[in-house]
Image (tube, rainbow, N blue to C red):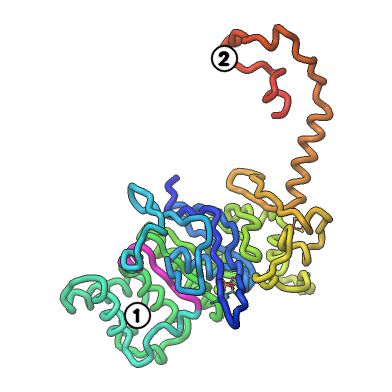
């Protein structure tokens, strides 16, 4: 499995200073994830959990006050891995759109209102590719047709298109140069459900055709269910759970993920949606321990002071929660309690022994006892 981007213990903070008072917003705080080639990787979580900040870092859009204070982002498009911190702004700009591309949040507003769509495409492609205008126009027309967009949009101004069509044009613009990694921030937010479905299909088609990799941020778990291959659930700048999408929906293990899924509307179910009161904390002073503890219905004493470890609970499934930690520690303790007491080592056992036939370890050894 080829890893396209590796984010390792990333800490990305907004550091500001006003009237001598320093404020540090820990928007992404110790996040480790790996994006696999050709997948659609979803990032979920309520507003204010650090999703857009993570995308800015992935794209190398590091303008103050956003600062990387720890960890790394490594790209591995072909051959040698490249550490983002080693790239200059000029190198990052050169990578953007051709290697890494971006569908920004609220992308309805990114099209120039006084330019026809054709001119926006010409300006954009002309800035990255040397080619005669006729060739550019033909490439744009062919791409729009390929994506099922009517080529008459080329002669239109943005305000003459519906919201859904504008969003599709923006996605076409962000993907026409066949970038390897496409990052989309809330690409379906503010669209009605039918139009949303069209945008989801478009993103899936682009991935199928070009074989690129996508990272899609949305707070809408319904979109994750329909679009993504894997989902990472973020809360207050940290990873709470990650699994492939069917597993996240069938067996959510983290209370926050369970809450996000329970608050999804269901067809034919008119009962009131259960929701956990409150909202994500301000990240300049996040709660200690598990950051979700002030809202968690299962919070225990340990949750208030100790940060839960990320545990692997199944293939491709990771969870950070004391319920899981304790469950596992309880199992280990029970196993140790039930284990046959080991005899004290004798002198002969302390002398080097010949390996047993086949090289197998003795079941009475330390590894045999705890496994
Ligand atoms: N330019 C900024 N300066 C200071 N804080 C910011 C800035 N942009 C975002 N934040 C803060 O960073 C946190 C994460 O924001 P963001 O990444 O936009 O979250 P999301 O995309 O999940 O809604 C929030 O607390 C937000 O207020
Ligand atoms: S660690 Fe504790 S507070 Fe956090 S989600 Fe798990 S049970 Fe709830
Ligand atoms: Mg956002």
Residue that carries the numbered disc 1 in the rendered image: 150
Q: CA distance from mark 2 to mark 1?
A: 68 Å
Q: Residue at x 43, y 66 (%)?
A: 59
- x and y percentages locating residue 290 in the rendered image: 73, 58
Q: Which quarter of the figure is the N terminus placed in? A: top left
Q: Is residue 167 visible?
A: yes
| Mark 2 or 1, nearer chain start | 1
Q: Which residues are magenta?
A: 94-105
Report the mark closest to the observer, 2 or 1: 2
SS state under label 2: helix
Q: Residue at x 46, y 79 (%)?
A: 107
- x and y percentages locating residue 206 in the rendered image: 39, 65
Ligand 3 under 8 Å from disc 1 Cβ: no
Residue 63, relative to residue 215: is it above or below? below
- x and y percentages locating residue 295 in the rendered image: 77, 66
Q: Is residue 269 left or right of residue 29?
A: right
Between 135 and 339, the residue placed more toward the observer is 339
SS state under label 1: loop
Between 312 and 310, the residue placed more toward the observer is 310
- x and y percentages locating residue 190 in the rendered image: 55, 81
Q: Is residue 38 left or right of residue 237?
A: left
Q: Is residue 178 visible?
A: no
Residue that carries the numbered disc 2 in the rendered image: 359
Residue 124, relative to residue 243: is it above or below? below
């Amino acid at each position: 499995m080829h890893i396209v981007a590796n984010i390792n213990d990333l800490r990305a903070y907004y550091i500001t200073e006003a009237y001598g008072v320093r404020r540090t917003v820990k928007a992404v705080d110790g996040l480790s994830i790996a994006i696999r080639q050709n997948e659609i990787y979803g990032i979920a979580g309520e507003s204010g959990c650090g999703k857009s900040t993570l995308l800015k870092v992935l794209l190398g859009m590091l303008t103050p006050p956003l600062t990387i204070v720890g960890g790394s982002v490594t790209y591995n498009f072909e051959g040698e891995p490249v550490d983002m911190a080693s790239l200059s702004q000029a190198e990052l700009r050169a990578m953007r759109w051709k290697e890494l591309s971006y569908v920004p949040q609220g992308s309805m507003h990114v099209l120039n209102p006084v330019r026809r769509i054709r001119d926006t495409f010409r300006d954009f492609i002309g800035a990255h590719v040397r080619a005669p205008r006729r060739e550019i126009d033909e490439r744009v027309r062919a791409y729009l047709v390929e994506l099922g967009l009517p080529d008459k949009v080329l002669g239109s101004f943005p305000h003459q298109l519906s919201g859904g069509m504008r969003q599709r044009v923006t996605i076409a613009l962000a993907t026409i140069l066949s970038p390897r990694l496409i990052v989309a921030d809330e690409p379906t937010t503010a669209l009605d459900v039918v139009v949303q479905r069209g945008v989801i299909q478009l993103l899936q088609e682009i991935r199928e055709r070009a074989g690129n990799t996508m990272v899609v941020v949305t707070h809408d778990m319904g979109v994750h269910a329909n679009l993504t291959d894997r989902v990472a659930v973020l809360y207050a700048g940290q990873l709470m759970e990650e699994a492939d999408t069917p597993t996240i929906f069938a067996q959510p293990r983290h209370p926050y993920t369970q809450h996000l899924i329970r608050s999804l509307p269901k067809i034919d179910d008119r009962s009131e949606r259960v929701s956990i009161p409150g909202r994500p904390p301000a990240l300049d002073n996040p709660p200690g321990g598990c950051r979700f503890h002030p809202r968690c219905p299962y919070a225990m004493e340990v949750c208030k002071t100790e940060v839960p470890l990320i545990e692997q609970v199944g293939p491709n499934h990771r969870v950070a929660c004391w319920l899981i930690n304790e469950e596992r520690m309880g199992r280990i303790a029970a196993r140790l309690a039930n284990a046959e007491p080991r005899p004290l080592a004798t002198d002969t056992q302390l002398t080097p022994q010949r390996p047993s036939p086949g090289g197998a370890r003795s079941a009475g050894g330390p590894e045999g006892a705890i496994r």
